[in-house]
Image (cartoon, helix red, strand yellow):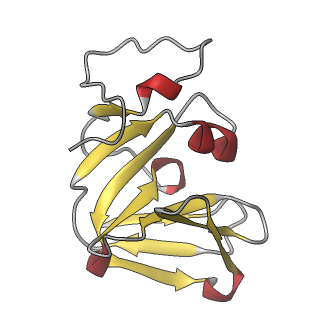
Amino acid sequence: MLKGRCECGTVKFEVESGIQALSHCHCSMCRRLHGAAFATFATVDSCAFRILSGELQLARYRSSADVVRTFCSECGSTLIADAVEDESVRYVSMGALEGAPPHPPAVHEFVTSKAHWYEIRDDGPQYEKSSP
């Protein structure tokens, strides 16, 4: 079981099943929203994801026609990205999870939008858009 929280601790959550996939997203939206070269997300089964506390402090932002992002309205921590057309999975911000992921991130997505000052230094697959 995985546990996670926002920075201020208001929102806490758990994921009962394992991580299906890990990805670094290099799109400009993720870079701006995370204030970093990329955002790392764990793909999990949406039925296995549960908010334990702070549900009333969750705020949502539709960052594109395809994605709704959920964050803590108190501290601003990005917690989840949901694909509008696929409710079977959730993309949990790895930075919000406690402990280490069960395996290293595997893929890089939206590499054509990658920050020009960042160089990808691993051998993970790279995709111009989202991974298959």
- Total marks drawn? 0
Q: Quadrant of residue 78?
A: bottom right
Residue 46: quarter of image: bottom left
Which quadrant of the rendered structure holds the C terminus?
A: top left
How far across and how far down the image is residue 64, in percent?
56, 58
Location of residue 95 in the rendering, given as x and y in whole percent from the top left corner: 53, 48
* Residue 129: x %, y % from top left: 36, 37
Q: Is residue 1 left or right of residue 90?
A: left
Q: Nearer the viewer, residue 127 or 96?
A: 127
Horizontal relation, residue 107 to residue 41: left or right: left
- Residue farthest to the right, as pictured: 74
Q: Is residue 120 above or below residue 20?
A: above
Where does residue 89 sit, x and y in percent of width and height? 30, 68
Residue depicted at 77% across the width and 63% down the height? 75
- Is 19 placed above or below 9 here? above
At x 60% / y 36%, what residue is drawn?
Answer: 28
Left or right relative to 27: residue 24? left
Q: Where the N terminus falls, by quadrant?
A: bottom left
Q: Residue at x 55, y 62 (%)?
A: 79
Single out the residue that lies furthest toward the front.
65
Residue drawn at the location 53% of the way across and 55% of the way down: 96
Instruction: Work out whether 101 lies above or below 63.
Output: above
